[in-house]
Image: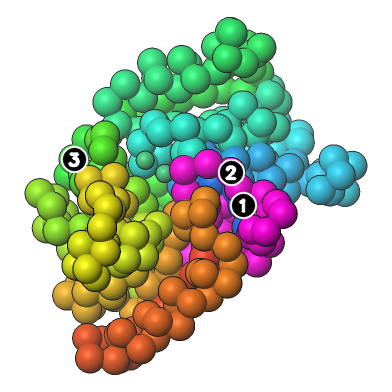
Amino acid sequence: MKIRFWGTRGSIATPSNNGLSTMKYGGNTPCVQVVANDGTIFIIDMGTGMKVLGDELMGLSPEGDKKKDSPFSKGEGEVNVFLSHFHWDHIQGMPFFKPLYIKGNRINLYAGEGCEKNMKHQMRKPFFPVEIDDTMSTKNYYEFNNGKTIKIGSVEITVRKLDHTDDVYGFRFQDGDSVLTYASDVEHNLKNKDNLLELAKGADVLIYDCQFTYMEYDPEIHGMEGMGKRQWGHSIIQEGIKISAEAGVKKLVSFHHSPESRDSKIDNIIEFAGKYKKDIKNDLEIMAAYEGLEIKL
Ligand SMILES: [Zn+2]
Ligand SMILES: [Zn+2]
């Protein structure tokens, strides 16, 4: 299994601007590509990073020039898209995913309740000039629910509900002995914690929502005033470390970075996490996801 990150930012696309550098970790919203041992292609979430992934699959350069023929440019490509939930930052790349417009390509879309209806609704006038039914590829819609297990190619995918502001699902991708767990847009220690533990059990890699710092999440605990970010549906790296310890995860990848986190702040979070893990799970590898990061399992 090969994992590649195309978008790592949460909530809204965040290009570098005056005073806030996001070049190191990237500004595109969530999109992760998984290529299975048998070559089956998966895409987890359709944030703005999906635009760049689509260009790559089409054999295009970043400037849009053709570099080479590819199965997707010839209408012979197939992808399996797994959507955690329908929030804007997880769907906005889809209208700009060029393989969608090529006759013959097969786009298999897996999501929770309302899969077909919501996918169609997000590409509709006056929000976007092209309706999804007018794109030339073949779309197949598959609705999943909590506890569902789906076998595609060499991969078995387990789907479990997690805790967020709206319905959200996490995924466990098992390909042979390798396990990837994706848990983005999740708040910790709530109703579905056991589902998260089940998905993450013995995982080689856990991609985990680390949008906030502890201080931002719970200022009162530090004697600061303010509401904090409880009930915003996101988590912190300390909880990612605890979950990793409990579930026996090997590598924790922080993800869904805040649009208000400059690169140096994410560096600091990872440095802090390296110290924090010592008493909890010292052998845990921890890193922050960045655009272009590849992990081979
Ligand atoms: Zn999100
Ligand atoms: Zn969300």
Residue 146, label in figure: 3
Disc 2 marks a residue whose amino acid type is Ala
Residue 11's x, y, as percent?
46, 43
Q: Which residues are magenta?
A: 1-25
Identify the residue shown where x is 70% and y is 26%: 102
- CB atoms at circles 2 and 3 under 8 Å apart? no
* Observer-nearest of 8 and 154: 8
Q: Specify whether residue 187 is in view.
A: yes
Residue 13, label in figure: 2
- Mark 2–mark 3 Cα distance, whole angstroms, equals 29 Å
Q: Quadrant of ligand 2?
A: top left
Q: Is residue 267 above or below residue 5?
A: below
Q: Residues within 10 Å of mark 2 (few under 14, many from 20)?
A: many
Is residue 119 a member of the stretch shown in magenta? no
- CB atoms at circles 1 and 2 under 8 Å apart? yes
Number of labels in the image equals: 3
Callout 3: SS: loop
Callout 2: SS: loop
Q: Where on the picture, by quarter, is residue 272?
A: bottom left
Residue 203's x, y, as percent?
30, 70
Q: Specify whether residue 239 is in view.
A: no
Identify the residue shown where x is 81% and y is 48%: 62
Q: Residues within 10 Å of mark 3 (few under 14, many from 20)?
A: some
Residue 51's x, y, as percent?
66, 40
Identify the residue shown where x is 29% and y is 31%: 112
Residue matched to label 1: 27
